[in-house]
Amino acid sequence: MPSTEQIKQFQGLYERRFGRQISEQQAYDMGMKLVTLVQLTCATQVKTQQKRNEGNQHDKETNPDGL
């Protein structure tokens, strides 16, 4: 849960970027959606990288000379 200070910071960032003020509730809601998006994106990247690593490991085990 974001702190009051973090919500205020988000409000300031939003106003500087888009030129309009938003309420604390709007800032909270938008901030939580942004955090969720970042978490999902990072989790997807981690899973993709793990699959790549597993594939690379399988290639090394089946063809240790790289031929």
Image (cartoon, helix red, strand yellow):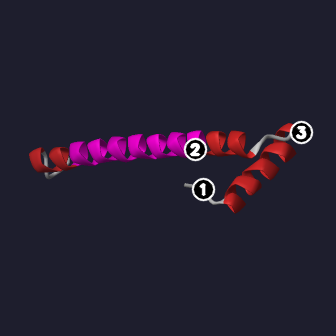
Question: In this rendering, which labeled residue sits more in front, label 3 or label 2?
Answer: 2
Against 34, residue 3 (above or below) is below
Does the CB distance between marks 3 and 1 fall below 8 Å?
no
Location of residue 48 (image quadrant): top left
* Residue receiving disc 3: 19
The amino acid on which the numbered mark 2 sits, given as a three-letter code, is Met
Q: Which residues are magenta?
A: 32-56
Per the image, is 40 magenta?
yes
Q: Residue at x 59, y 42 (%)?
A: 34
Q: Is residue 56 left or right of residue 58?
A: right
Looking at the image, which residue is at 55% across and 46% down? 35
Residue at the outermost right position = 19
Q: Would residue 26 be found to the left or right of residue 17 on screen?
A: left
Q: Nearer the viewer, residue 27 or 18?
A: 27
Label 2's element? helix
The number of numbered badges drawn on the structure is 3
From the viewer's perspective, is the residue at label 3 or at label 1 nearer?
A: 1
On residue 57, the disc is none
Seen at 60% across and 56% down, the residue is: 2
